Amino acid sequence: MFRGALWLLAGRGCVGRGLSTRSGGSTPDWTEKVSEIKKKIQSALPGGAWDPLYDTSHLPPEHSDVVIVGGGVLGLSVAYWLKRLEKPRGAIRVLVVDRDHTYSRASTGLSVGGIRQQFSLPENIQLSLFSVDFLRNINEYLAVVDDPPLDVQFNPSGYLLLASEKGAAIMENNVKVQRPDMAALPSVITMVSQEQESATDRSPSLTRDIRQEGAKVCLMSPEQLQNKFPWINTDGVALASYGFSTSSSRMQTSGGKEMTLKRIHEVHVKMDHSLEYQPVECALVINAAGAWSGQVAELAGIGKGPPGTLEGTKLPVEPRKRYVYFWHCPEGPGLETPFMADTSGAYFRREGLGHNYLGGCSPTEEEEPDPGNLEVDHDFFQDKVWPHLAHRVPAFQSLKVRSAWAGYYDYNTFDQNGVVGPHPLVVNMYFATGFSGHGLQQAPAVGRAVAEMVLKGQFQTIDLSSLLFSRFYLGEKVEERNII
Amino acid sequence: MAAPRASLHLVAPKWNLGTSGIRGLSSAVTPEGNQRKGRMLLQFLTDRFYDVEAIRQYLFQKQVSKVHKENRSSTGIKKQYGPYIAGAYFVLKQGGAVKFQGEEWIRSKHGYSPLQLLSFQAVPIEAVDASDCAINYEGLDNLLALKELQSLLLQRCPHVDDWCLSRLHQLANSLQELSLAGCPRISERGLACLHHLQNLRRLDISDLPAVSNPGLTQILVEEMLPRCEVLGAEWAQGLKSGPEQQSQDTASPIPA
């Protein structure tokens, strides 16, 4: 009877929250009619939809403050941080639009899922550091009362990057950027140096210089690598980096020519498999469409103009297909396997308890596969990935590929780093895309940065002003040397 | 895959059931039934009223921040008295026990003040028993400064998870005994980080509900730490019994 009283109250007050039709043995079409009548009554009552004539509850709303194009991890991260950082509560209406609710081709679900702080750009390191913190404390951010605690199934085994003689100097420089204060982590250094006593030191240096950013990384020589992971073949490796995780309104050109600034007024959201569309009037549009961000930017008119000018600068993000292979190797490395990236660009990680491994390799520019479909090329594994894996880990000479899939990188053809922030001409379009394979690991931090840009007008926690759109026009490449 | 996780209740959270272990196990059916009815009522109210949901969310956030407050690092004490006193104070405040080198176990329910520990200023700590304490990733800072720690007992700690295990490599030189029995949030991925602890001689990984296959995990951990004695599950645990369900493919190759 308590439930009955509440149901009556709920029927009038809280529209659409936990309601269920009472069906007690009546014929099906009668209950359908009852539910239709109930819907009509609800739409006529205060709090219901404004269209009493036909039901538009399946369409997006007509007005929204922010429309986020793209519902992958970056889009959802921006949405989360916008709602979390808004003042007062409920101030901003956010609409996230994605064209595929099953996420069958979204890069988020198809990603291999490695997180590392071994980047060369300080901004990238900071982004990864915060994202690792976010994942570690994810229950504080995303937990809901009465639901089980979230389990990200994170594997804190670390990330091992190998460098040949050529890359060793770059890697050492990178580590200088990654770890500022060796006094902060004395125990890691002592662990490394104890093994050093018994090894002949051929590697460039284990002299710890100033490391600026605070990531937990240690450099290892090939001998230490062999001691630690006996299943690696250290032929050709000069250095290894082992990281524990465990992160305008009026503008004039220099010639005095006036630029026209544009605004996006409406986003037309077309429903799946139908001709219906809803024009959503919005104040801001955030482009987080991943591999298809270039197309979305073209819809907004970015890049339509004479080449070489700011109007003519396109968003240089295009989809690039990458393959991931899943294999089984009973003699393979044990439970302590880190996420390993070889000197040749091949990478792999362990999955689960059953000696299964996932991995792949990024093809060179000449061998780029056609991104038109997500078909997997198994010959690529035979010719390009397996030889490198077998050379580095001799146990992988006998393995059996169980399955494979392909996914898209939102590849930034300009400098392979993300684009964040507003467009100089289309004043209400913000970008959060182009991360070329490290979007998943930087998503929480990028979401927060974009939300700060939207709500406060500037980057507050991590300064990403070097990743703005204007660098494409100015030709300033922000290069990351550790792209997998 | 993993064992079913408890819900984030505000009414008698399951994580803390371990501390009142004896009471929890012997609770009669009627109090348990009343508790379930109360929980269902709360859930029903939360689904229907924004106010109830907001209050519950607020109380939950308060619980989380309480754990954070308990795990603050006491840098003042560390600077003044040294890392050993600071570590001992932290553990005793949480309700654990500490053993200095050459002394007996010190355990205090209401926490020791640092003055009483001053007599042990330069004495390193060799064993810490932090069982049933609300120690988490940040609180582990205090323990990682104890460079001569030989034995660490983290049984039934509700907030020790895989991330915490990935930090234990800093104690690799001295740690010889580690016990993780009954921690609800440790999975096999966290156990993979223990391969840094090459001096470990005794490891207890029994009764970990979040580990998907205890027998197989035991075998893999034994392979990973060859000089360590691993207590925990029997290797046959997790294998399906019965002739119609042969499960040879789940067993990994016998370690050489």
Image (tube, rainbow, N blue to C red):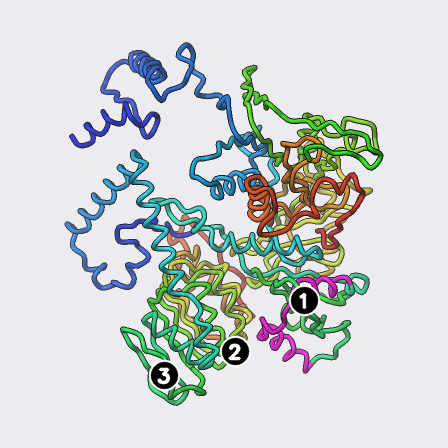
**Residue B80 has which mark?**
none
Count neighbours of disc 2 (C-alpha within 10 A) and say few if under 14, some if 14 to 19, many if 20 or more. Answer: some
Residue B109 in sight: yes
Q: Chain of mark 1?
A: A
Q: Quadrant of residue A192?
A: bottom right
Write down the region rendered in magenta: A170-198
Discs 2 and 3 share one subunit: yes
Discs 3 and 1 share one subunit: no
Disc 3 designates what residue? B117
**Residue A211 has which mark?**
1
- Three-letter code, disc 1: Arg
Residue B31 image position (x, y, % from top left):
16, 51
Toward the top, the furthest residue is: A53
Residue A67 falls left or right of residue B86: right
Residue A406 in sight: no
Disc 2 designates what residue? B199
Q: Quadrant of residue B119?
A: bottom left
Which badge, 2 or 3, is on the more N-terminal residue? 3
